[in-house]
Protein backbone atom coordinates (compact mmCIF):
# COMPACT_ATOMS: atom_id res chain seq x y z
CA UNK A 1 0.00 0.00 0.00
CA UNK A 2 2.86 2.39 0.80
CA UNK A 3 4.31 1.74 -2.66
CA UNK A 4 0.99 2.61 -4.32
CA UNK A 5 0.75 5.80 -2.28
CA UNK A 6 4.27 6.80 -3.36
CA UNK A 7 3.33 6.19 -6.99
CA UNK A 8 0.25 8.37 -6.67
CA UNK A 9 2.22 11.19 -5.02
CA UNK A 10 4.93 10.98 -7.70
CA UNK A 11 2.36 10.98 -10.49
CA UNK A 12 0.52 13.99 -9.04
CA UNK A 13 3.74 15.91 -8.59
CA UNK A 14 4.86 15.09 -12.16
CA UNK A 15 1.50 16.22 -13.53
CA UNK A 16 1.83 19.53 -11.67
CA UNK A 17 5.44 20.04 -12.75
CA UNK A 18 4.62 19.73 -16.43
CA UNK A 19 2.56 22.92 -16.54
CA UNK A 20 4.14 25.80 -18.46
CA UNK A 21 6.01 27.90 -15.84
CA UNK A 22 5.05 31.43 -16.92
CA UNK A 23 6.51 32.98 -13.77
CA UNK A 24 9.96 31.54 -14.57
CA UNK A 25 9.72 32.90 -18.11
CA UNK A 26 8.88 36.37 -16.88
CA UNK A 27 11.73 36.25 -14.34
CA UNK A 28 14.19 35.48 -17.16
CA UNK A 29 12.82 38.21 -19.42
CA UNK A 30 12.84 40.77 -16.61
CA UNK A 31 16.49 40.25 -15.73
CA UNK A 32 17.74 40.50 -19.34
CA UNK A 33 19.36 43.92 -19.72
CA UNK A 34 19.14 45.89 -22.93
CA UNK A 35 22.38 47.60 -23.95
CA UNK A 36 22.96 51.15 -22.74
CA UNK A 37 24.46 53.18 -25.61
CA UNK A 38 26.06 56.64 -25.10
CA UNK A 39 24.59 59.61 -26.97
CA UNK A 40 27.50 60.05 -29.43
CA UNK A 41 26.46 59.43 -33.07
CA UNK A 42 28.36 59.21 -36.33
CA UNK A 43 26.83 58.93 -39.80
CA UNK A 44 29.06 56.90 -42.13
CA UNK A 45 28.36 59.35 -44.99
CA UNK A 46 30.16 62.07 -43.01
CA UNK A 47 33.24 59.86 -43.00
CA UNK A 48 33.13 59.41 -46.77
CA UNK A 49 31.12 56.20 -47.15
CA UNK A 50 29.56 55.59 -50.55
CA UNK A 51 26.33 53.60 -50.73
CA UNK A 52 26.82 52.83 -54.42
CA UNK A 53 27.14 49.01 -54.12
CA UNK A 54 30.64 49.22 -55.64
CA UNK A 55 33.00 51.26 -53.46
CA UNK A 56 34.78 49.46 -50.63
CA UNK A 57 33.70 51.03 -47.32
CA UNK A 58 35.81 48.86 -45.03
CA UNK A 59 38.10 51.72 -43.89
CA UNK A 60 35.12 53.99 -43.22
CA UNK A 61 33.36 51.46 -40.98
CA UNK A 62 36.63 50.77 -39.15
CA UNK A 63 37.04 54.51 -38.60
CA UNK A 64 33.46 54.84 -37.32
CA UNK A 65 34.09 52.06 -34.82
CA UNK A 66 37.38 53.71 -33.73
CA UNK A 67 35.58 57.04 -33.17
CA UNK A 68 32.99 55.27 -31.05
CA UNK A 69 35.75 53.68 -29.01
CA UNK A 70 37.38 57.08 -28.48
CA UNK A 71 34.01 58.43 -27.26
CA UNK A 72 33.35 55.41 -25.03
CA UNK A 73 30.68 54.21 -27.44
CA UNK A 74 27.86 55.54 -29.58
CA UNK A 75 25.64 54.85 -32.59
CA UNK A 76 26.96 54.27 -36.10
CA UNK A 77 24.23 55.36 -38.52
CA UNK A 78 24.06 53.68 -41.93
CA UNK A 79 21.55 55.60 -44.11
CA UNK A 80 19.85 54.27 -47.25
CA UNK A 81 22.14 52.88 -49.93
CA UNK A 82 24.14 49.69 -50.50
CA UNK A 83 27.51 49.69 -48.73
CA UNK A 84 30.05 47.18 -49.95
CA UNK A 85 32.51 46.14 -47.22
CA UNK A 86 35.51 44.01 -48.17
CA UNK A 87 36.23 42.47 -44.79
CA UNK A 88 34.73 42.14 -41.32
CA UNK A 89 33.20 44.66 -38.95
CA UNK A 90 34.77 44.21 -35.50
CA UNK A 91 32.71 45.69 -32.67
CA UNK A 92 33.87 47.55 -29.61
CA UNK A 93 31.75 47.93 -26.46
CA UNK A 94 28.84 50.37 -26.08
CA UNK A 95 28.05 50.58 -29.81
CA UNK A 96 24.81 50.37 -31.78
CA UNK A 97 25.23 49.67 -35.50
CA UNK A 98 22.01 51.21 -36.83
CA UNK A 99 21.21 50.15 -40.39
CA UNK A 100 18.34 52.34 -41.52
CA UNK A 101 15.45 51.46 -43.81
CA UNK A 102 16.53 50.83 -47.43
CA UNK A 103 20.15 50.55 -46.28
CA UNK A 104 22.11 47.40 -47.01
CA UNK A 105 25.54 46.26 -45.89
CA UNK A 106 26.90 43.87 -48.49
CA UNK A 107 30.02 41.94 -47.54
CA UNK A 108 32.65 40.71 -49.97
CA UNK A 109 32.97 36.98 -50.51
CA UNK A 110 36.77 36.82 -50.80
CA UNK A 111 38.03 34.59 -47.98
CA UNK A 112 41.33 36.49 -47.72
CA UNK A 113 39.37 39.60 -46.71
CA UNK A 114 38.50 37.81 -43.42
CA UNK A 115 42.10 37.26 -42.33
CA UNK A 116 43.93 37.48 -39.99
CA UNK A 117 42.16 34.68 -38.18
CA UNK A 118 40.28 35.29 -34.94
CA UNK A 119 39.39 33.09 -32.00
CA UNK A 120 36.00 31.60 -32.75
CA UNK A 121 34.17 28.29 -32.68
CA UNK A 122 33.16 25.92 -35.46
CA UNK A 123 30.42 23.35 -34.88
CA UNK A 124 31.10 23.21 -31.16
CA UNK A 125 34.93 23.31 -31.13
CA UNK A 126 36.98 26.39 -30.21
CA UNK A 127 39.63 27.29 -32.81
CA UNK A 128 41.12 30.07 -34.92
CA UNK A 129 39.43 30.60 -38.28
CA UNK A 130 38.33 33.26 -40.73
CA UNK A 131 36.70 36.17 -38.91
CA UNK A 132 32.92 36.17 -38.80
CA UNK A 133 31.62 38.96 -41.04
CA UNK A 134 30.38 40.89 -37.99
CA UNK A 135 32.37 39.94 -34.89
CA UNK A 136 32.14 41.15 -31.30
CA UNK A 137 34.59 39.65 -28.80
CA UNK A 138 34.54 40.46 -25.09
CA UNK A 139 32.16 43.39 -25.58
CA UNK A 140 29.29 44.66 -23.47
CA UNK A 141 26.33 46.83 -24.48
CA UNK A 142 26.30 46.08 -28.21
CA UNK A 143 23.46 46.31 -30.70
CA UNK A 144 22.55 45.91 -34.35
CA UNK A 145 19.28 47.72 -35.05
CA UNK A 146 17.30 49.45 -37.77
CA UNK A 147 15.16 48.16 -40.63
CA UNK A 148 18.00 47.64 -43.08
CA UNK A 149 19.62 44.48 -44.45
CA UNK A 150 22.89 42.61 -43.96
CA UNK A 151 23.88 40.52 -47.00
CA UNK A 152 26.62 37.95 -46.46
CA UNK A 153 27.18 37.15 -50.16
CA UNK A 154 27.35 33.48 -49.17
CA UNK A 155 26.03 31.80 -52.28
CA UNK A 156 29.12 31.62 -54.49
CA UNK A 157 32.70 31.20 -53.18
CA UNK A 158 31.65 30.43 -49.61
CA UNK A 159 29.08 27.94 -50.85
CA UNK A 160 31.83 26.08 -52.74
CA UNK A 161 33.66 25.52 -49.41
CA UNK A 162 31.03 22.99 -48.29
CA UNK A 163 32.34 20.26 -50.61
CA UNK A 164 35.92 20.85 -49.38
CA UNK A 165 35.39 21.16 -45.63
CA UNK A 166 35.83 17.52 -44.56
CA UNK A 167 39.57 17.67 -43.81
CA UNK A 168 39.25 20.83 -41.71
CA UNK A 169 36.13 19.58 -39.95
CA UNK A 170 37.77 16.26 -39.05
CA UNK A 171 40.95 18.01 -37.88
CA UNK A 172 38.91 20.31 -35.63
CA UNK A 173 37.20 17.32 -34.06
CA UNK A 174 40.50 15.50 -33.54
CA UNK A 175 41.84 18.60 -31.80
CA UNK A 176 38.75 18.62 -29.58
CA UNK A 177 39.09 14.93 -28.69
CA UNK A 178 42.86 15.16 -28.14
CA UNK A 179 42.65 18.31 -26.01
CA UNK A 180 44.99 20.22 -28.35
CA UNK A 181 45.75 23.66 -26.81
CA UNK A 182 43.43 26.23 -28.40
CA UNK A 183 46.39 28.42 -29.40
CA UNK A 184 47.52 25.58 -31.68
CA UNK A 185 44.14 25.10 -33.37
CA UNK A 186 44.86 27.29 -36.38
CA UNK A 187 42.70 26.52 -39.37
CA UNK A 188 41.63 29.25 -41.82
CA UNK A 189 43.23 29.24 -45.27
CA UNK A 190 43.29 25.81 -46.88
CA UNK A 191 40.79 24.23 -44.48
CA UNK A 192 37.55 25.58 -45.99
CA UNK A 193 35.58 26.16 -42.78
CA UNK A 194 33.07 28.90 -43.58
CA UNK A 195 32.74 31.79 -41.11
CA UNK A 196 29.56 32.71 -39.31
CA UNK A 197 27.84 35.86 -40.55
CA UNK A 198 27.34 37.50 -37.12
CA UNK A 199 29.01 36.28 -33.95
CA UNK A 200 28.83 37.72 -30.44
CA UNK A 201 31.48 35.91 -28.37
CA UNK A 202 31.98 36.47 -24.62
CA UNK A 203 29.59 39.42 -24.76
CA UNK A 204 26.92 40.79 -22.44
CA UNK A 205 23.81 42.95 -22.96
CA UNK A 206 23.20 42.32 -26.66
CA UNK A 207 20.31 43.57 -28.82
CA UNK A 208 19.60 42.51 -32.41
CA UNK A 209 16.39 44.21 -33.52
CA UNK A 210 14.35 44.62 -36.73
CA UNK A 211 17.18 43.97 -39.20
CA UNK A 212 16.97 41.60 -42.17
CA UNK A 213 19.60 38.88 -42.62
CA UNK A 214 20.25 37.46 -46.07
CA UNK A 215 22.60 35.10 -47.85
CA UNK A 216 24.91 34.01 -45.02
CA UNK A 217 28.07 31.95 -45.69
CA UNK A 218 27.34 29.64 -42.72
CA UNK A 219 25.36 30.07 -39.47
CA UNK A 220 23.59 33.44 -39.53
CA UNK A 221 23.65 34.61 -35.90
CA UNK A 222 25.93 32.79 -33.47
CA UNK A 223 25.57 33.78 -29.81
CA UNK A 224 28.62 32.22 -28.13
CA UNK A 225 29.51 32.25 -24.42
CA UNK A 226 27.33 35.35 -23.98
CA UNK A 227 24.50 36.43 -21.71
CA UNK A 228 21.63 38.88 -21.43
CA UNK A 229 20.58 38.75 -25.09
CA UNK A 230 17.51 40.08 -26.91
CA UNK A 231 16.74 39.16 -30.53
CA UNK A 232 13.45 40.60 -31.79
CA UNK A 233 11.72 41.68 -34.98
CA UNK A 234 14.45 40.15 -37.15
CA UNK A 235 13.63 38.62 -40.55
CA UNK A 236 15.58 36.17 -42.68
CA UNK A 237 16.06 34.98 -46.20
CA UNK A 238 19.16 32.84 -46.08
CA UNK A 239 19.00 29.54 -47.92
CA UNK A 240 22.62 28.41 -48.34
CA UNK A 241 24.17 25.34 -46.71
CA UNK A 242 23.98 25.30 -42.88
CA UNK A 243 22.21 28.66 -42.74
CA UNK A 244 20.85 28.23 -39.21
CA UNK A 245 18.96 31.34 -38.15
CA UNK A 246 20.08 31.66 -34.51
CA UNK A 247 22.60 29.43 -32.72
CA UNK A 248 22.78 30.16 -28.98
CA UNK A 249 25.79 28.24 -27.57
CA UNK A 250 26.99 28.33 -23.94
CA UNK A 251 24.51 31.18 -23.37
CA UNK A 252 22.49 32.42 -20.44
CA UNK A 253 19.33 34.54 -20.34
CA UNK A 254 18.15 34.88 -23.94
CA UNK A 255 14.89 36.26 -25.39
CA UNK A 256 14.05 35.50 -29.03
CA UNK A 257 10.70 36.98 -30.08
CA UNK A 258 8.74 38.14 -33.12
CA UNK A 259 11.30 36.70 -35.53
CA UNK A 260 10.31 35.67 -39.07
CA UNK A 261 12.55 32.85 -40.23
CA UNK A 262 13.25 31.64 -43.77
CA UNK A 263 16.38 29.54 -43.55
CA UNK A 264 18.16 26.76 -45.39
CA UNK A 265 18.67 24.94 -42.10
CA UNK A 266 17.45 25.10 -38.48
CA UNK A 267 15.58 28.23 -37.41
CA UNK A 268 16.85 28.15 -33.81
CA UNK A 269 19.50 25.56 -32.87
CA UNK A 270 20.45 25.61 -29.19
CA UNK A 271 23.93 24.23 -28.62
CA UNK A 272 26.52 23.85 -25.85
CA UNK A 273 29.81 22.63 -27.24
CA UNK A 274 30.87 19.28 -28.63
CA UNK A 275 32.20 16.09 -27.07
CA UNK A 276 35.25 16.30 -24.73
CA UNK A 277 35.57 20.07 -24.90
CA UNK A 278 31.86 20.57 -24.27
CA UNK A 279 31.80 18.21 -21.30
CA UNK A 280 34.78 20.08 -19.82
CA UNK A 281 32.63 23.25 -19.93
CA UNK A 282 29.74 21.78 -17.95
CA UNK A 283 29.81 24.81 -15.60
CA UNK A 284 28.41 26.92 -18.48
CA UNK A 285 25.46 25.08 -20.02
CA UNK A 286 23.06 26.89 -22.33
CA UNK A 287 20.19 27.92 -20.09
CA UNK A 288 17.23 30.22 -19.58
CA UNK A 289 16.20 30.64 -23.22
CA UNK A 290 12.77 32.04 -24.16
CA UNK A 291 11.50 31.72 -27.75
CA UNK A 292 8.06 33.21 -28.43
CA UNK A 293 5.78 34.68 -31.10
CA UNK A 294 7.99 33.53 -34.00
CA UNK A 295 7.17 32.37 -37.53
CA UNK A 296 9.11 29.28 -38.54
CA UNK A 297 10.16 28.35 -42.06
CA UNK A 298 13.15 26.24 -43.07
CA UNK A 299 14.53 22.83 -42.12
CA UNK A 300 13.55 22.58 -38.43
CA UNK A 301 11.74 25.00 -36.10
CA UNK A 302 13.47 24.70 -32.71
CA UNK A 303 16.35 22.26 -32.29
CA UNK A 304 18.41 21.35 -29.24
CA UNK A 305 21.71 19.75 -30.27
CA UNK A 306 23.36 17.91 -31.60
CA UNK A 307 26.39 19.71 -30.09
CA UNK A 308 25.12 20.08 -26.51
CA UNK A 309 27.80 18.38 -24.41
CA UNK A 310 27.89 21.04 -21.66
CA UNK A 311 24.12 20.65 -21.25
CA UNK A 312 20.97 22.59 -22.14
CA UNK A 313 18.30 23.46 -19.58
CA UNK A 314 15.35 25.76 -19.00
CA UNK A 315 14.12 26.33 -22.55
CA UNK A 316 10.66 27.82 -23.06
CA UNK A 317 8.99 27.95 -26.49
CA UNK A 318 5.51 29.40 -26.91
CA UNK A 319 3.05 30.99 -29.33
CA UNK A 320 4.88 30.13 -32.57
CA UNK A 321 3.65 28.96 -35.94
CA UNK A 322 4.92 27.85 -39.32
CA UNK A 323 4.57 29.90 -42.49
CA UNK A 324 5.87 27.13 -44.77
CA UNK A 325 7.23 23.60 -44.77
CA UNK A 326 9.44 22.35 -41.93
CA UNK A 327 11.13 18.97 -41.91
CA UNK A 328 10.66 18.76 -38.13
CA UNK A 329 8.78 21.04 -35.78
CA UNK A 330 10.55 20.56 -32.43
CA UNK A 331 13.69 18.39 -32.56
CA UNK A 332 15.90 17.25 -29.67
CA UNK A 333 18.95 15.44 -31.00
CA UNK A 334 22.03 14.04 -29.33
CA UNK A 335 24.14 10.88 -29.57
CA UNK A 336 26.47 8.70 -27.50
CA UNK A 337 29.49 10.94 -28.27
CA UNK A 338 27.99 13.93 -26.49
CA UNK A 339 27.21 13.31 -22.83
CA UNK A 340 25.66 16.28 -21.05
CA UNK A 341 21.93 16.70 -20.60
CA UNK A 342 18.77 18.23 -22.02
CA UNK A 343 16.25 19.01 -19.31
CA UNK A 344 13.40 21.31 -18.36
CA UNK A 345 12.07 22.08 -21.84
CA UNK A 346 8.54 23.48 -22.11
CA UNK A 347 6.78 23.95 -25.46
CA UNK A 348 3.23 25.24 -25.81
CA UNK A 349 0.83 26.89 -28.27
CA UNK A 350 2.55 25.82 -31.49
CA UNK A 351 0.80 25.65 -34.87
CA UNK A 352 2.54 23.51 -37.48
CA UNK A 353 1.30 23.06 -41.02
CA UNK A 354 3.03 20.30 -42.98
CA UNK A 355 6.12 18.58 -41.59
CA UNK A 356 8.01 15.34 -42.04
CA UNK A 357 8.04 14.70 -38.27
CA UNK A 358 6.15 16.79 -35.75
CA UNK A 359 7.83 16.23 -32.34
CA UNK A 360 11.09 14.27 -32.37
CA UNK A 361 13.45 13.34 -29.52
CA UNK A 362 16.42 11.09 -30.16
CA UNK A 363 19.45 10.15 -28.07
CA UNK A 364 20.89 8.25 -31.05
CA UNK A 365 21.33 10.97 -33.69
CA UNK A 366 22.91 9.50 -36.86
CA UNK A 367 23.44 6.28 -34.85
CA UNK A 368 26.86 7.66 -33.93
CA UNK A 369 29.13 7.51 -30.93
CA UNK A 370 29.77 5.52 -27.80
CA UNK A 371 30.51 5.95 -24.14
CA UNK A 372 28.77 9.28 -23.42
CA UNK A 373 25.02 8.90 -23.57
CA UNK A 374 23.09 12.07 -22.78
CA UNK A 375 20.42 12.49 -20.15
CA UNK A 376 17.09 13.72 -21.54
CA UNK A 377 14.41 14.48 -18.97
CA UNK A 378 11.51 16.76 -18.06
CA UNK A 379 10.33 17.64 -21.56
CA UNK A 380 6.77 18.97 -21.81
CA UNK A 381 4.56 19.70 -24.82
CA UNK A 382 1.09 21.25 -24.68
CA UNK A 383 -1.45 22.79 -27.08
CA UNK A 384 0.24 21.77 -30.33
CA UNK A 385 -1.51 21.33 -33.67
CA UNK A 386 -0.12 19.96 -36.91
CA UNK A 387 -1.97 19.50 -40.19
CA UNK A 388 0.15 16.71 -41.61
CA UNK A 389 3.24 14.68 -40.74
CA UNK A 390 4.43 12.87 -43.86
CA UNK A 391 6.45 10.51 -41.63
CA UNK A 392 5.95 10.49 -37.85
CA UNK A 393 3.74 12.33 -35.40
CA UNK A 394 5.75 11.74 -32.21
CA UNK A 395 9.14 10.01 -31.91
CA UNK A 396 11.00 9.22 -28.67
CA UNK A 397 14.27 7.25 -28.91
CA UNK A 398 16.30 6.61 -25.78
CA UNK A 399 18.82 3.93 -24.88
CA UNK A 400 17.93 0.83 -22.90
CA UNK A 401 20.60 1.67 -20.33
CA UNK A 402 19.81 5.42 -20.33
CA UNK A 403 16.13 6.03 -20.89
CA UNK A 404 14.50 9.33 -21.74
CA UNK A 405 12.48 10.27 -18.65
CA UNK A 406 9.50 12.37 -17.60
CA UNK A 407 7.94 13.42 -20.87
CA UNK A 408 4.43 14.84 -21.11
CA UNK A 409 2.08 15.57 -23.99
CA UNK A 410 -1.10 17.49 -23.30
CA UNK A 411 -3.68 18.56 -25.89
CA UNK A 412 -1.78 17.52 -29.03
CA UNK A 413 -3.60 17.18 -32.37
CA UNK A 414 -1.80 15.88 -35.44
CA UNK A 415 -4.48 15.56 -38.10
CA UNK A 416 -2.61 13.19 -40.38
CA UNK A 417 0.56 11.10 -39.96
CA UNK A 418 2.05 8.13 -41.79
CA UNK A 419 3.35 6.80 -38.45
CA UNK A 420 1.55 8.00 -35.35
CA UNK A 421 3.89 7.20 -32.47
CA UNK A 422 7.31 5.60 -32.05
CA UNK A 423 8.27 5.36 -28.40
CA UNK A 424 11.29 3.30 -27.31
CA UNK A 425 13.45 3.32 -24.21
CA UNK A 426 11.51 6.01 -22.39
CA UNK A 427 9.85 5.96 -18.99
CA UNK A 428 7.21 8.05 -17.30
CA UNK A 429 5.62 9.27 -20.53
CA UNK A 430 2.29 10.94 -19.84
CA UNK A 431 -0.23 11.58 -22.62
CA UNK A 432 -3.42 13.56 -22.05
CA UNK A 433 -5.80 14.44 -24.91
CA UNK A 434 -3.46 13.34 -27.69
CA UNK A 435 -4.99 12.79 -31.14
CA UNK A 436 -2.99 11.54 -34.12
CA UNK A 437 -5.10 10.98 -37.22
CA UNK A 438 -8.88 11.08 -36.93
CA UNK A 439 -10.38 11.39 -33.48
CA UNK A 440 -12.33 8.29 -32.54
CA UNK A 441 -16.06 8.84 -32.21
CA UNK A 442 -18.68 6.91 -30.27
CA UNK A 443 -18.23 3.15 -30.80
CA UNK A 444 -20.92 1.51 -32.86
CA UNK A 445 -23.20 -0.88 -30.95
CA UNK A 446 -23.92 -3.49 -33.62
CA UNK A 447 -21.51 -5.29 -35.93
CA UNK A 448 -22.06 -4.64 -39.64
CA UNK A 449 -20.83 -8.15 -40.56
Image: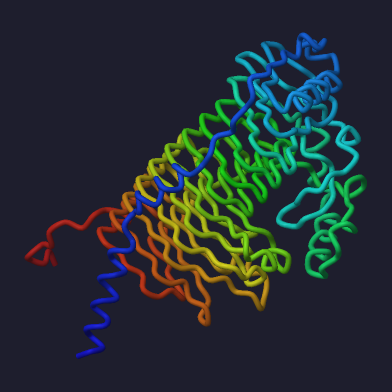
Quarter of the rendering occupied by the N terminus: bottom left
The residue furthest bottom is 1
Side of 383 where 284 appears, left or right = right
Q: How is the image coloured?
A: rainbow
Answer with the quarter of the image where residue 207 lies: top right
Quarter of the rendering occupied by the C terminus: bottom left
Residue sitting at x 34%, y 60%: 409
Residue 189, position in %: x, y?
92, 45
Residue sitting at x 85%, y 18%: 56
Number of marks in the rendered image: 0
Residue sitting at x 44%, y 56%: 359
From the viewer's side, name the closer residue of 309 and 306: 309
Residue 420, position in %: x, y?
38, 60
Q: Is residue 289 above or below residue 174?
A: above
Q: Is residue 369 above or below residue 24?
A: below
Q: Is residue 252 above or below residue 243?
A: below
Residue 325, position in %: x, y?
50, 40
From the viewer's side, name the closer residue of 366 and 227: 227
Answer with the quarter of the image where residue 373 lies: bottom right
From the viewer's side, name the closer residue of 404 and 83: 83
The residue furthest front is 71
Side of 43 where 284 appears, left or right = left
Residue 254, position in %: x, y?
53, 45
Q: Is residue 427 above or below residue 203?
A: below
Amino acid sequence: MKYLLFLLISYTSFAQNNEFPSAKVEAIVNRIQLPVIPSYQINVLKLGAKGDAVSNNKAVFDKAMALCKKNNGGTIIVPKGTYKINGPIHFVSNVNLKIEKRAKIKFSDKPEDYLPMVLTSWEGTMLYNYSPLIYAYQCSNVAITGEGTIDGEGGKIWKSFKAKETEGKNLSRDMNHNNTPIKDRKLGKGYFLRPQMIQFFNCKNILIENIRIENSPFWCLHLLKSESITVRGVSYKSLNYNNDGIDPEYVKDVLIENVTFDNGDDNVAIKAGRDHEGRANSATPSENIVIRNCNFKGLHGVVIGSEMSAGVQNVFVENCKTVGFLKRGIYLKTNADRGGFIKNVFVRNIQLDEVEDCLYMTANYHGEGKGYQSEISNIHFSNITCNKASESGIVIQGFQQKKIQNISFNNIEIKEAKNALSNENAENVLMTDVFIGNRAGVPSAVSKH
